[in-house]
Amino acid sequence: MKLSPRLIEVTVPERPAGAVLVLHGGAGRRENMMVSPTQLSVLRMIPIARRISRAGRGRLAVFRLLNSARGWDTRKTPLRDAQWALEQIAERIGDDRSVSLVGHSLGGRAALLSAAQPRVRSVVALAPWVYPTDIAAGLSDQQLLIVHGTRDRIASPARSAALARALGARATYVSIEGGKHAMLRHHRRFDRLAADFVTATLLD
């Protein structure tokens, strides 16, 4: 059976000033590569998408992407799904609207590596699972925000901080003291940082 990605509308105003694509994380499992709408890595992004929608005050189209498969390996990555979603958004609201990508964990990695895609103006990577060399080819004036908790034991805060340094002035790094990978204990701060950055880069 061929697995396909799904684009879920959170809010789509009639004439949006920009669009936001929210990307979930989630490691692969050999026995089940399908993405379930009820897996925790997917559910965690729902309140973030809603927070962004409220912050946009009816001016931003917000979408969530369900990847075609779980995880990231040499055979498949979420990058093709993200590119597909960006193309779908352009068809839905027009190809002259700027886009912000917001991703968690491996979704944060996918967002950062998709930053140079057409129309992408900004990226928020929350607790991203990255390497310090994860720099998208063709970056220009995109604005990037990386937010990571100091107690994350799944994705390395040190690697994401090193990536932020390698990205230079276009990237901002915010450390959340005591924050863990699921972003639950300090969820209000993670969510607010994402929403504020998106609205600032797309609407200001």
Image (cartoon, rainbow, N blue to C red):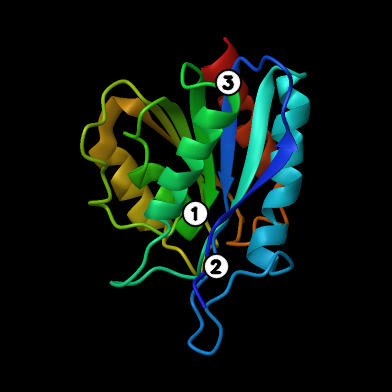
Circles 1 and 2, Cβ within 8 Å, touching? The answer is yes
Q: Dot 2 corresponds to which residue?
A: 26
Residue drawn at x 31%, y 33% as measured from the top left = 116
The answer to whether one can see residue 189 in this image is no
- In the displayed structure, would residue 57 be above or below residue 135? above
Question: Does residue 98 appear to the left or right of 47 in the view shown?
Answer: left
Rate crowding at label 3 as few (under 14), some (14 to 19) or many (20 or more) other CA atoms within 10 Å. many
Q: Residue 107 got which mark?
A: 1
Distance from Cα at disc 1 to Cα at disc 2: 8 Å
The circle on residue 157 is: none
x and y, in percent, of residue 138 in the image: 21, 32
Q: Nearer the viewer, residue 41 or 179?
A: 41
Tell me the distance, in whole angstroms, between the alpha carbons under discs 1 and 3: 20 Å
Q: Are marks 3 and 2 in contact (CB under 8 Å)?
A: no
Secondary structure found at label 2: loop
Residue 106 position, x and y percent, is 46, 59
Q: Identify residue for label 3.
A: 18
Quadrant of the image occupied by residue 171: top left
* SS category of the residue bearing label 3: strand
